[in-house]
Amino acid sequence: MNKHFLLTILLALCTASLQAATFTLNKPMAAGQLTPLCLPVTATLADFDELFAVGGIDDNGHASLYPVATVAAGTPFVARCAAARASTIFDNVTVSTAAPSERPLVWQGGSVQGDYAAYSWHYTTVLGSVGIPSQLIFDVQDLQNMNFDVTLENLSARRFLSQTRYTFNLASQIERYNNGLLERPDEPNPVTLPIPVAAMGEVTVSVGTAEGLADVDVVTQQAAAGVCEVYNLIPQRTYYYTMTSAGAVVSRGQFHTTGHLRMIYVPTISNVRDLGGWPTQDGRRIRYGRIFRGGELDGTNNGKSPSSAADKQTMKDLGVTAEIDLRWTGREGDYTGRSAYGFSEADGTFYFVDGDDYAGGHLDRPETMEHYRRSFNMIVSTLRGGGGIYFHCVWGADRTGLFALVLEAVLGVTPDAFFKDYELTTFSIAGLRSKNNFSGQPKYFDAYAGATIAERAANYLRTRLGIPQEDIDYFRDTMLE
């Protein structure tokens, strides 16, 4: 049975030079009790009787502890000794920092991550610092019955989404959240599953949404050290997993994914996310896993490397079967028939728009209307075939943002969602995208009849683009839940 421990500690580390061969931890440790530590040296089971990595710190200061064999220098952890100790000696060690002082424990949901110059037991959550420094409630997890919550939204996105509520008249707040805490704030927070001490060699992790794993969604393999990171799961789902090593199950359990924004991890593609999860004005949400938006796939114009085989497999695993390329010959080059992922214009799975459609005023241009007519028809056709579709320009920002707005307007999303979806691009290599420069775009549909934005946007599709009402209805029925 899990036990909860309320620990209020003050972490005192002695100063050691980079040349020292011995490090002394002057920290009293009571027998059998959990003691939070953060050392400038690697800690192993040779130094303590039990080691636990810290993860899953929530807004109330509750954290899950995962048994581990080794903790890297500078990583917060919790230790337990069988007998009381006044100090602990580490011989023949390389001290990683001359004067460790404080380290913030930054919650990203499921793990404590990040590179920081200071060490401490002050911790930070989505709401800022909670409680007093060094006070956490620990829940020691049973590796054969893991059960925890984890957000898929990274720290920057989580703060932005939870602390900001937009209307048409409110000024942008996005710059205050683009603070450089994360190396890639356009990428999701992974689910980190601890690899037990008992694991040997390679471990295989199977993850699915059905108890008993009758529907395995993810299988990942890696060396038996540290943690296994699982990406691109769907928010607001309960997942089950098993971890096997040398033919034996070494860990199993379940976890619940929280948040609503589904950020997608594809290493060489920037700013990728699911259109799903955004709320609508009638109380529903856009369905996950059918339409995705992001940056270019081939890295031609944004300076990134071409997509790898692993990236292509990721998109396939997401269910993407078609691509709309919103780039423009006049700026980026001619990509007619040149899908980086092998989609084809011949079978209707690829469309190179060749347009500069980035502003709401363009929605009345004949060429833009033709681009959007063909794009919407392609989306409906893809959805009818059970597939998913990815649309992009170079950065996944303005042209992608405007097309996303049209789709979201037909689905009836809230103004808050319009603006946040556009501004999230700020966390990518595209740079600042402010609602201050976008707030007039959703108002374009006010020129059309209808009591709601969904009705007005549908009138635009029907009267200006010639989209049949039955296709609009199908799109809504398929994309809303």
Image: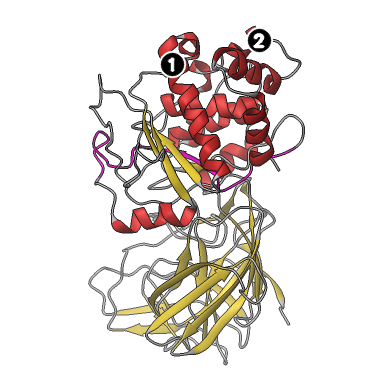
Where is residue 112 drawn, in percent x and y? 50, 61
Q: Secondary structure at mark 1?
A: helix
Q: Is residue 97 magenta?
A: no
| Residue indicated by mark 2 | 448
- Mark 2: amino acid: Tyr
Q: Of all residues shown, which one is farthest toward the top?
A: 447
- Residue 290 painted magenta: yes
Of the pair 410 and 198, the residue shown nearer to us: 410
Quadrant of res 241: bottom right
Q: Quadrant of the N terminus?
A: bottom right
Q: Position of residue 127 (x, y in %)?
A: 63, 45
Q: Looking at this view, is 438 or 27 the one in front?
A: 438
In front here: 88 or 422? 422
Q: Which residues are magenta?
A: 284-304
Ranked by sequence position, the earlier of labels 2 and 1 is 1
In the displayed structure, would residue 147 be above or below residue 190? below
Q: Is residue 45 above or below residue 256?
A: below
Q: Which mark identifies residue 282?
A: none
Residue, x 31% and y 47% (percent of image)?
342
Other-residue count near label 2 (Cα within 10 Å), few / some / many at <14 / 14–19 / ≥20: some
The structure residue drawn at horizontal position 33% and vertical position 42%, both measured from the top left corner, is 297
Task: State which quadrant residue 163 falls in.
Answer: top right
Secondary structure, magenta segment, majority class: loop
Is residue 101 in view? yes
Element type at mark 2 = loop
- Checking the image for residue 368, the label placed there is 1
| Residue 446 position by quadrant | top right
Q: Please, what is the three-letter code of the amino acid marked with disc 1? A: Thr
Q: Quadrant of the C terminus?
A: top right
